[in-house]
Amino acid sequence: MLGRSVGIDIRQERFLHDLVEVFLHTIALEPARWTPKKVSQNLSVLLPRIAGAGFRTVEVFEPHLGGEAGWPEIRNLLRECGLKPAILSSYVNLLTLSEEELPRAADTLEKTLRFFAFSKVRIFPGPRISPSDDAAVTTFTRRLSWLAGRLEGMEILLETHDLSIADDPDRIVRVVRDIGAPQVGLLFQPTVFDGKSELLQFARQKEFVRHVHLQNRDSAMRFVPLAEGVTPWKAILRDLPAGVNASLEFVPAGICPEEQFDLEAVLAQVKSEAAFVRQGV
């Protein structure tokens, strides 16, 4: 009995040390995220509130950055608030660009990353592309490999998002293997919200997971707190590779129309969700 108790303590101790930090993804504070408007809240309002909620590192929803003219103000505010912009959630689509457009898009992406000193960039692995579309997967892999060569010193995270190449957990792993670049990895989130399927997906992808997006759903696909949904986060988080961090992506209080959005309620919920993750139990 004593040995078993010590074993549990060691597992929890490892998790608490290896999951170094819980980031806040600014998309969690954006009720217009899935509308044509995209952005209803300015980062000049959000960043001080994020810092006040106890976060020190952020993943940034790219539309929140706005036009380049406003970048210096945002960068200064990040510094004033003591916030590190670690991950850019980019919406560059490597499959819809022409060969002529690709270098310009890469230049713009690199300029954004360097200006704010992001160390990682999140990219969708072929939005609306079936993993069985060999031609599209080959083109995506070739272009991503080229981009990785351009973004020296940057980590590229392919989000395991549904309705993409990541719908097949093994196919997206093969993409990463085929590129063979150490800075290209996976940003894990479930593609199917079913506990057994999620654990199987994680087991297949664990070797390449570099970051995690935290959200949870119930059996009816409604957003619920991390501790209450179908995703077995306790098991997944305890089994993360050493040094992997996580971002709070969505919380139930933030899933509402813009006119019903309550920033105070959402900030309170992201704080409680972060506390759940840090507990490791």
Image (cartoon, rainbow, N blue to C red):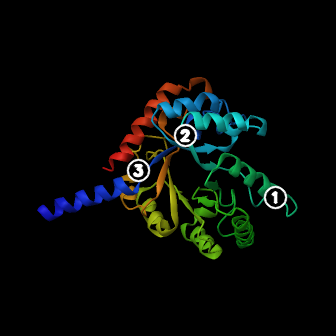
Instruction: Report the front residue among 137 and 62.
Output: 62
| Sequence-first tag of 2 and 1 | 2
* Amino acid on which disc 3 is placed: Val
- Name the residue tied to disc 3: 230
* Amino acid on which disc 2 is placed: Leu
Is label 1 in a helix, a strand or a loop? loop
Q: Is residue 208 above or below residue 270?
A: below
Left or right, 261 with reference to 200: right
Quadrant in the picture for the N terminus: bottom left
Is label 2 in a helix, a strand or a loop? loop
Percent from the top left, x then y, of residue 84? Answer: 56, 44
Q: Quadrant of residue 60?
A: top right
Percent from the top left, x then y, of residue 224? Answer: 44, 40
Binning the other alpha carbons within 10 Å of mark 1 as few (below 14), some (14 to 19) or many (20 upward) gives few
- Name the residue tied to disc 1: 97
| Sequence-first tag of 2 and 3 | 2
- Name the residue tied to disc 2: 83
Q: Is residue 106 above or below residue 269?
A: below
Contact? badges 2 and 3 (CB < 8 Å): no
Binning the other alpha carbons within 10 Å of mark 2 as few (below 14), some (14 to 19) or many (20 upward) gives some
Which residue, as the protein is rendered here, is positioned at the far right? 100
Which residue, as the protein is rendered here, is positioned at the far left? 1
Is label 3 in a helix, a strand or a loop? loop
Number of the front mark, 2 or 3: 2
Q: Distance between the residues labelled 2 and 1?
A: 33 Å
Number of the front mark, 2 or 1: 2
